[in-house]
Amino acid sequence: MPPSAITTIGDELSIALGNLTQSITSLNAPVLRLGVTGLSRAGKTIFITSLIENLLKPERLTAFAPVAQGRFLGAQLVEHPDRKTPRFAYEAHLAALRGETPAWPQSTRQISQIRLALRYESQNWLTNWAGPATLYLDIVDYPGEWLLDLPLLSLSYAEWCTEALERARTAHKTPESEAFLEAVANVDEQANADEGLAEQLSGAFKAYLIAARQDKHSLSTLPPGRFLMPGDMEGAPALTFAPLDPQMARAPLFALMQRRYDAYLREVVRPFFRDHFARLDRQIVLVDALRALNTGPEAMNDLETALTSVLEAFRLGANSPWTWFIGRRIDRALFAATKADHVHHTSHDRLEAIVERLLQRAAQRARFAGTLTRSLAIAAVRATKEGMIDEGKQSFPCLIGTPQKGEVLDDTIYAGDEEIALFPGDLPEKPESVFQPQFAAGQLNFLRFNPPKPDPDSKLPLPHIRMDQAIDFLIGDWMK
């Protein structure tokens, strides 16, 4: 699904005009637009908060070349020229992480953005002769659920109905999925465009999507995304539709649902893609593989399908002076396995291999288009420490941290205030194995941990794993 398949001529003209305007206004100080992509609960908000804090206080960025070489002069938050989009609540998110009782930031419910000005000395003597250089870094945050809508741009209502109903029939059976399928089966083939029936079907469909997303199922391919996170569209008629049997195509109810689906794509999804994704320069894709691993191969295969279909919508490829004016491309993409602090460092290479396997098709497409890619296991905020457990004459590596309230291990339900040491298990040596039916759910058990308690006397940013490497890959070449 190339980007041209999901954009209209008007979209392309709007994108080109936006690129031209930004190129002209940023001749003196370039602007780099970083896309932070990830499905729900992949850790986008935490990543952005850590990214900003570490750039403002770069002492822990030892692998970020401008810092390592002594050329980084500092960063500061500046006003974003787009005053229509809410500002990313960096200070509130950081306060949550650094409070007396640290807490993870709340899930994103709407689009927000923020801009940093990065000052550095260039390695180019000609550029440096004019004094320190400035790079503006724009970062956008948005609900991960909304990503699920991008593949819909290439599907008609009838095509989406076929996919959605097949998915409901073949995925994990739940009372909600069975209730939804029963409701669809009971609709008369000549059903009128009844608003009450439309609301009933839409409500049953939403209940099924919400249930399928829960931890015990951990399914990811669950569009439309705003059915899961409506934002300011809660209760809007544009969200009152559901898939019907395509054999009902002549029914007035089918026509009503089709009009609302088309309006949803036209008025909600397409502007979201055009305004926030079609102008990206760099991309980091955050993947919470551990949550799917807890559930089993069905969740892993579903996660692969969701990520592959979403990433097909992005504009990948090498940039040139011409593309900067008519249609910028994502020329670097980092595939990051999040929550690397939830496994021992000896398994980090295996975690990276699993993410590489998850995104194999997307990465091949990116490289073919000319995009430089890399896989990396990271933790934007490190919530655990490593230690050793002695059992008899043997010692085993372990993680030390405080499980979140309600986490369960071996029939123990944690209250959220007890530090424990545990061995989460070894990730399999061959990444392909986690996609096979033989890889049963329950072989691995990764808990969720509370944020670390910050040292009140320390001026350092919160600890991380490989954030410096991630930052260097994403923006380091722009600061040479």
Image: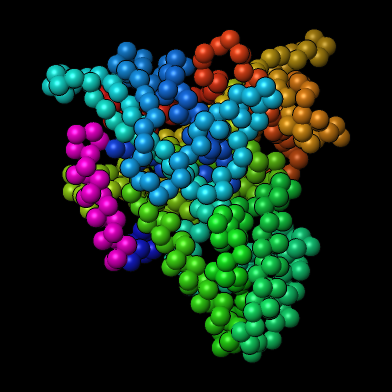
Camera sees residue 114: yes
15 magenta-colored: yes
Residue at screen point 32% across, 17% down: 73
Q: In this picture, is 363 found above or below 473? A: below
Residue at screen point 76% across, 21% down: 419
Image color mode? rainbow
Residue at screen point 55% across, 21% down: 462
Specify the segment rendered in magenta.
Answer: 9-30
Specify whether 289 is left or right of 170: left
The quarter of the displayed image where residue 8 is located: bottom left
Question: Of 296 and 185, which appears nearest the observer?
Answer: 185
The quarter of the displayed image where residue 222 is located: bottom right
- Report x, y in % for residue 402: 73, 24
469 magenta-colored: no
Residue at screen point 24% across, 55% down: 17
Question: Of 340 and 258, which appears nearest the observer?
Answer: 258
- Report x, y in % for residue 296: 69, 46
Camera sees residue 373: no
